[in-house]
Image (cartoon, helix red, strand yellow):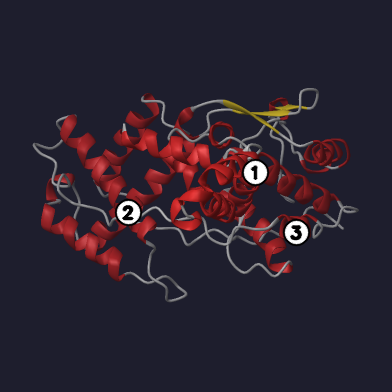
């Protein structure tokens, strides 16, 4: 099967506005500021896309300079985002609306701080609250195995896709972190992956399974040279067109295999959730999972403790006086301790609660 296919764009429609709009000049100043502050390329690209959307909205209303933007105008934009409907008729998610507004608020904070504006009109514009939700649709180990069997391991693109999905599940790596992996980030000898400038611009090493390493090795030896175009910058994974993956192309590839398995919702992040969930269920200390995922706060990793609820319920039934009666406590405590020693799920959760109170 040829690898150089006719390209079909999967990117969302570009947001365009009048290039002469003075707001673009101030956007360029802001991007330069973010670069000097050493924000990641991913963060800068995300903020830029959000602000271009806002500038396009301003352009349609004849707003050509930051001095024209007032708090009532920003509140109109906030209502616009709330009323906006995508091509499929669905509204923007709370997370998307919050991201757009936070980008605008940060931009105007910079403009006021650097004296491009006398004050920040966005200071009191509040984005929608986005409550933290438990991970939904956590894949079981059996479902993971089914997805991994979907790529054709006898074809070049199947080998590459299998290597990518194996890496997602084995490491819990974020989508954009995988896209930026280089050949030298893979340590076959020690079974680890170096994630350079992950979220928060922090480096970390994470372990990787032997199975994932075997597929990566097969991809590097048998497939990668068919995809890479000069000059070779050492990027690990390439698309069928010899390009570096972007968020959309990687998401589409993974979604395809999930759909073939009968999984209707989710994509790359499902493997991150599954890895953390399965490790916790099998007794991994929550702090180790925190380090692998690259979470700064333990409370973020704690979202995965919900999947251990069956084990926690067993601990509860075996140890709580309301379930046992006072007479059975001593024996039950010994029994619960023996049962929980390999998992440490309960102690991890108690420690988390203590940490949250500090």
Judge by depth and name the residue closer to the eye, 6 or 331.
Answer: 331
Residue 179, visible in the rendered structure: no
Judge by depth and name the residue closer to the eye, 343 or 337.
Answer: 337
| Separation (CA) of disc 2 from disc 1 | 44 Å
Chain-order first, disc 3 or disc 2: 2
| Coordinates of residue 266 in the picture (x, y in percent) | 58, 61
x 32%, y 29%: residue? 33
| Separation (CA) of disc 3 from disc 1 | 25 Å
Density class for disc 3 (Cα within 10 Å; few <14, some 14-19, many ≥20) is few
Chain-order first, disc 3 or disc 1: 3
Give residue 339's mark: 1
Q: Is residue 61 left or right of residue 92?
A: left
Where is residue 350, by image quadrant? top left
| Coordinates of residue 34 in the picture (x, y in percent) | 36, 31
Give residue 142's mark: 3
| Coordinates of residue 122 in the picture (x, y in percent) | 17, 47
| Separation (CA) of disc 3 from disc 2 | 36 Å
């Amino acid at each position: 099967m040829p690898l150089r296919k006719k390209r079909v764009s999967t990117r969302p429609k570009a947001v365009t506005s009048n290039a002469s709009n003075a707001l673009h000049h101030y956007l360029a100043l802001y991007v330069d500021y973010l670069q000097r502050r050493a924000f990641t390329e991913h963060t800068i690209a995300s903020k830029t896309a959000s602000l271009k959307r806002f500038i396009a909205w301003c352009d349609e209303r004849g707003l050509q300079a930051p001095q024209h933007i007032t708090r009532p105008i920003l509140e109109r934009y906030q209502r616009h985002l709330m009323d906006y409907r995508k091509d499929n008729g669905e509204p923007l998610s709370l997370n998307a609306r919050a991201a757009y507004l936070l980008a605008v608020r940060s931009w105007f904070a910079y403009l006021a701080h650097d004296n491009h504006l006398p004050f920040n009109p966005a200071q009191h514009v509040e984005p929608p609250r986005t409550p933290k939700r438990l991970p939904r649709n956590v894949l079981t180990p059996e479902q993971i195995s089914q997805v991994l069997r979907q790529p054709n391991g006898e074809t070049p693109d199947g080998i590459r896709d299998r290597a990518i999905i194996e890496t997602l599940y084995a490491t819990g790596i974020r989508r954009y972190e995988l896209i930026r992996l280089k050949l030298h980030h893979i340590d076959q000898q020690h079974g680890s992956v170096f994630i350079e400038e992950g979220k928060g611009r922090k480096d970390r090493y994470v372990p990787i399974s032997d199975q994932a390493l075997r597929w990566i090795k097969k991809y590097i030896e048998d497939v990668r040279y068919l995809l890479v175009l000069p000059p070779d910058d050492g990027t690990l994974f390439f698309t069928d067109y010899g390009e570096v993956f972007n968020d959309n192309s990687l998401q589409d590839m993974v979604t395809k295999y999930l759909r073939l398995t009968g999984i209707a919702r989710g994509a790359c992040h499902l493997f991150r959730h599954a890895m953390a969930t399965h490790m916790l269920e099998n007794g991994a200390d929550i702090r180790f999972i925190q380090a692998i995922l690259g979470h700064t706060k333990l409370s973020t990793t704690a979202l995965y403790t919900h999947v251990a609820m069956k084990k926690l319920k067993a601990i509860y039934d075996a140890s709580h006086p309301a379930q046992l009666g006072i007479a059975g406590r001593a024996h039950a405590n010994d029994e619960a301790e023996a049962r929980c020693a390999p998992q440490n799920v309960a102690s991890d959760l108690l420690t988390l609660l203590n940490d949250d109170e500090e």
